[in-house]
C-alpha cells in the first residue's frame, strides 16, 4: 500500500473521479484537483483520507496553487488526467479554443510532472500516470488540437521515462478509447456508430492504469482492441474471398 499521497487532476468527474475512488479503495490518500468545488466535494465524500483543491489548471494562478500544494507532503503518484477538447475542425477553432487546449492538455501536464518528478528523483521512488487518448494515434479532423496535445503528452512521457526509470520513478501512459463519460456529449461528438465492445468504463480505465503503473508498463490501452482489430484484418479478406466463391 502506498503511504505517500496521490494527486489526481480533473478529479471532479469521469476518469479522474474513478482514479480518485480506486486509489481510495487501495488505501492511498488522495488530493483531488478540479475546477468545480461542489463536484469535488461529492467525489471526496467517497474517498477516505482525501482532500480537495479547487484550481483551474489552464491558468497560471491555478497551476501555481497546485504546484504549491504538491510541494508540501511528498507526492507518491501524480495522475495527469485533466484535459479538454475544442469544437470541430481546426478552421472552426477560435484562438481561445486552441490556447485553452494547449494550456490544460500540455503545459499543465509538463509543469505538474516537473513539480512531482524533482522530489521523486531525490527519494528514488514514485510514479506519474499520463492520461492520453486513442486520438493521439488516430487523429481526426474533428479533434485536431486535442489529438496533437495528446500525442505531445505521449512524447513527453517517453522522455520522462528515459530520465526517471533508472532512478526508481515509473512513468505510465494510459490511452483510453471510447469511455462512458460526459466527454463525448460535452463536445458534440456523434458516437452512435461505435460498437459496444469498443467502450470502457472510467473504472476500467483507472484500474488498468494503476495496475500498469505497478508493473512499470510504459503504455496501456483501454479497452485493448488490438487482438480483435488484428483478427479483423486477417479474417476480413478471408470472409470476402469466401463470399465471392459462394456467388460464383
Image (cartoon, rainbow, N blue to C red):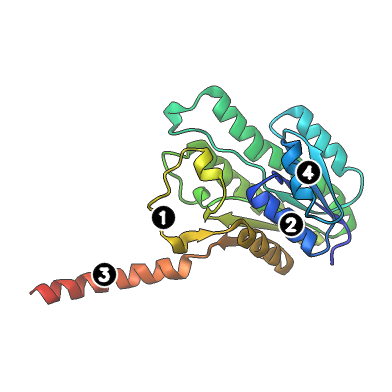
Please, is residue 87 above or below residue 112 in the view?
A: above
Distance Cα–Cα, label 4 vs label 2: 12 Å
Q: Which residue is mark 1?
A: 194
Query: Between disc 4 and disc 2, whose residue precedes?
Result: 2
Residue found 62% across the figure and 59% down from its top: 205
Q: Seen in the image, is 142 located left or right of residue 59?
A: left
> In the structure shown, which secondary structural element does the residue marked by tag 4 occupy?
helix
Q: Is residue 118 above or below residue 221?
A: above
Is 117 placed left or right of 207 in the picture? right
Query: Badge 4: how crowded within 10 Å, few (<14), some, or many (20+)?
Result: some
Q: Where is the N terminus found, in terms of image quarters?
A: bottom right
- Of mark 3 and mark 4, the one earlier in the sequence is 4
Q: Are marks 1 and 2 in contact (CB under 8 Å)?
A: no
Q: Give the residue number, with chain letter if any, for mark 3.
A: 237
In the picture of the structure, the residue carrying the numbered disc 2 is: 21
Task: Give the mark nearest the N terminus, 2 or 3.
Answer: 2
Q: Position of residue 133 (x, y in %)?
A: 55, 50
Disc 1/disc 4 C-alpha distance (Å): 33 Å
Residue 99 visible somewhere in the drawing: yes
Residue 159 in view (yes/no):
no
**Residues at marks 1 and 2, CA–CA distance in whole angstroms:** 27 Å
The residue that label 4 is drawn on is 41
Q: How many marks?
A: 4
| Image side of residue 226 versus residue 244, left or right | right
Foreground disc of the pair 3, 4: 4
Characterize the local packing of mark 1: few (<14), some (14-19) or many (20 or more) Cα atoms within 10 angstroms. few
Mark positioned earlier in the residue sequence (1 or 3)? 1
Q: Residue furthest right?
A: 72
Instruction: Tell me the element at label 3.
Output: helix
Q: Residue at the location (78% across, 43% down)?
A: 41
Q: Check whether the beta carbons of the residues at disc 2 and disc 3 lie within 8 A of each other.
A: no
Residues at marks 1 and 4 touching, judged by CB atoms closer than 8 Å: no
Amino acid at each position: 500500500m502506498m503511504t505517500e499521497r496521490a494527486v489526481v487532476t480533473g478529479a471532479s468527474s469521469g476518469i479522474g473521479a474513478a482514479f480518485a475512488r480506486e486509489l481510495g479503495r487501495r488505501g492511498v490518500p488522495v488530493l483531488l484537483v478540479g475546477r468545480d468545488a461542489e463536484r469535488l466535494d461529492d467525489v471526496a465524500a467517497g474517498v477516505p483520507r482525501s482532500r480537495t483543491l479547487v484550481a483551474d489548471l489552464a491558468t497560471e494562478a491555478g497551476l501555481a496553487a497546485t504546484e504549491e500544494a504538491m510541494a508540501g507532503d511528498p507526492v507518491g503518484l501524480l495522475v495527469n488526467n485533466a484535459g479538454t477538447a475544442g469544437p470541430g475542425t481546426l478552421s472552426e477553432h477560435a484562438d481561445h479554443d486552441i490556447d485553452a487546449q494547449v494550456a490544460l492538455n500540455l503545459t499543465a501536464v509538463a509543469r505538474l510532472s516537473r513539480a512531482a518528478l524533482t522530489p521523486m528523483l531525490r527519494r528514488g521512488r514514485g510514479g506519474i500516470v499520463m492520461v492520453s487518448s486513442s486520438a493521439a494515434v488516430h487523429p481526426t479532423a474533428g479533434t485536431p488540437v486535442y489529438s496533437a496535445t495528446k500525442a505531445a503528452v505521449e512524447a513527453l512521457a517517453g522522455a520522462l521515462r528515459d530520465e526517471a526509470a533508472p532512478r526508481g520513478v515509473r512513468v505510465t501512459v494510459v490511452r483510453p478509447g471510447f469511455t462512458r463519460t460526459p466527454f463525448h456529449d460535452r463536445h458534440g461528438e456523434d458516437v452512435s456508430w461505435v460498437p459496444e465492445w469498443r467502450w470502457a468504463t472510467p473504472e476500467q480505465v483507472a484500474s488498468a492504469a494503476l495496475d500498469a503503473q505497478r508493473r512499470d508498463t510504459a503504455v496501456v490501452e483501454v479497452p485493448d482492441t488490438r487482438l480483435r482489430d488484428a483478427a479483423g484484418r486477417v479474417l476480413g479478406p478471408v470472409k470476402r474471398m469466401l463470399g465471392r466463391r459462394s456467388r460464383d
